[in-house]
Structures are given as C-alpha cells and as structure tokens.
Image (cartoon, rainbow, N blue to C red):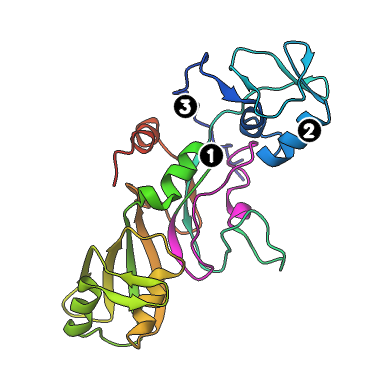
Amino acid sequence: MKKKKPFKQIKYKENADPNAPIRLNKYLANAGICSRREADEFIQAGVVKVNGEVITELGTKITRVDEVLFHNQPVQLESKVYVLLNKPKGFVTTTDDPENRKTVMELVKSAATERIYPVGRLDRATTGVLLLTNDGDLASKLTHPKYEKRKIYQVWLDKPVTMEHMQMIADGIELEDGEIHADAISYVTEEDLTQVGIELHSGRNRIVRRIFEKLGYRVLKLDRVYFAGLTKKKLSRGKWRYLTEQEVNMLRMGAFD
C-alpha cells in the first residue's frame, strides 16, 4: 500500500510591520501559549520576561523584534494557518464539546501543529464551507457584525416553496430577534421548487432554518456553498485544503463583502 504523503503546509507572508507595537498579552496569545486573559495572569505572576527583564505591568506593549521569554523559554510567534473545510453533517463547530460529540477539529487534525479554531459556526446538521485559522484579527473581521460577510446557502425543504413566500423572504420577515431579509433568493431549478438558493449577510444564529420554519417549512438539508469569497469547489465532503496566498490576501484586504 502506498504511504500517504503528509500535506505540505503553506507559509504565508506576514503582513505585519515588525516594529509595530503589540500588546504583550496579544503576542503570547498569537504565539499559541494561552488566551489573552490567561496571558494577563501569567504576566502578573512574573513568569514573562522581555529583553531579559521581568514584566508584570498589564497593557505593556512590545514589538516583534523584542526577545520574549515565558518560564525562561523563548517565545516565537506561530506561523499563520488558514484551512478551508467542506464540513460534513454530524460534526459540531467547536474546538471541544462537553457532550463528547464529534467536532470539526477531528477532520483537520493533520492540518497544523498550531492551535487553529473555526471562524463562526455551522450547526451540527449544516454542511459546507468552513474556515479554520489561528489568525485572530482576521477571524474577528470575518465574524464581527460590523463587517457582515456574504454567505450563500443551498436549502432543501420538505415541500415546494411558494412564490409568495419567496417574495416575503426577499422583502423581509419578522423573527424573534428582529427583521431579516435575503439579499437574493431563487429556486435552484425550475423543475424542483423544494430546492432554494439564498444569499444573506447576517451572521445570526440558525438564521436560514428560522426563516423557513417561520413560514411553515422544515429544512431537510442545508449546505453553505459560499462564505466571504470562499467556495468548496473541488473539495469533497469532509475534506480540507489550505487557502492560497491570494485567497488570504483577499480576505485580509476585505475584498469580499
């Protein structure tokens, strides 16, 4: 049997200025040592040195050229990793699950030694495009309500969707957490009116399912085919790939609405 070659991780160009000041807690978090909150506790405990000096003051800023030691071990910023997964059904989008259900992390465990995590959520039964990374700045840009990104879903319903309901979804319907309207909605084919494509910018929880449930439909299957410019083209279900340098640059520049 042929031995499977390990995936070659892509090294992305850093777009950060090495002399730009960065908070020490953020630096430790970006290095994969701990969370920012934990970093503050370690700083106060006196186990972090910068250029040979113990730093205990919170909010201290350093640059990437400073020498940082954590428990007397040198700290290096982790390489950034960007992984695109075509999520299958039955996996939860968390890094760990208290109920011991399967998580998406099991599917990408060979992708990186760095600690990556999912950007945003797809519920357990939803499939499709999911990005995982350790780039916290990009992750917050992609999920923050201020920068709502375009998402396109294919929806399979338990019965044909009426033209009247299609129009209502386009015009806007009232849900328990406020009004929502689709940016675009259409039938996937004219022969099968139980399949719909819907485009939204909202990142609200279970939004697609709630739209159709409100109008009396049951969602049988939900697949995210597009997220912030990324698609699952040529990526079979349950498989992943690294983003290209070009895709990463486009995401960093906010080239996709």
Instruction: Tell me the crowding category of disc 3: few under 14, some 14 to 19, or many 20 or more residues within 10 angstroms, Cα based.
Output: some
> In the image, is residue 110 part of the stretch drawn in magenta?
yes
Quadrant in the picture for residue 212: bottom left
In-front residue for pair 165/247: 165
Residue 21 against residue 143 in the figure, above or below: above
Earlier sequence position, callout 3 versus callout 2 = 3
Q: Amino acid at mark 2?
A: Phe
Q: Which residue is mark 3?
A: 12
Between marks 1 and 3 in the image, the one whose residue lies nearer the viewer: 1
In-front residue for pair 47/16: 47
Q: Which residue is mark 2?
A: 42
Residue 162 against residue 14 in the figure, above or below: below
Q: CA distance from mark 1 to mark 2?
A: 20 Å
* For the residues bearing labels 1 and 3, Cβ distance under 8 angstroms: no
Earlier sequence position, callout 1 versus callout 3 = 3
Magenta segment range? Answer: 104-129
Q: CA distance from mark 3 to mark 2?
A: 30 Å
Q: Which residue is mark 1?
A: 136
Q: Amino acid at mark 3?
A: Tyr
Q: CA distance from mark 1 to mark 3?
A: 15 Å
The residue at 73%/40% (across/down) is: 38
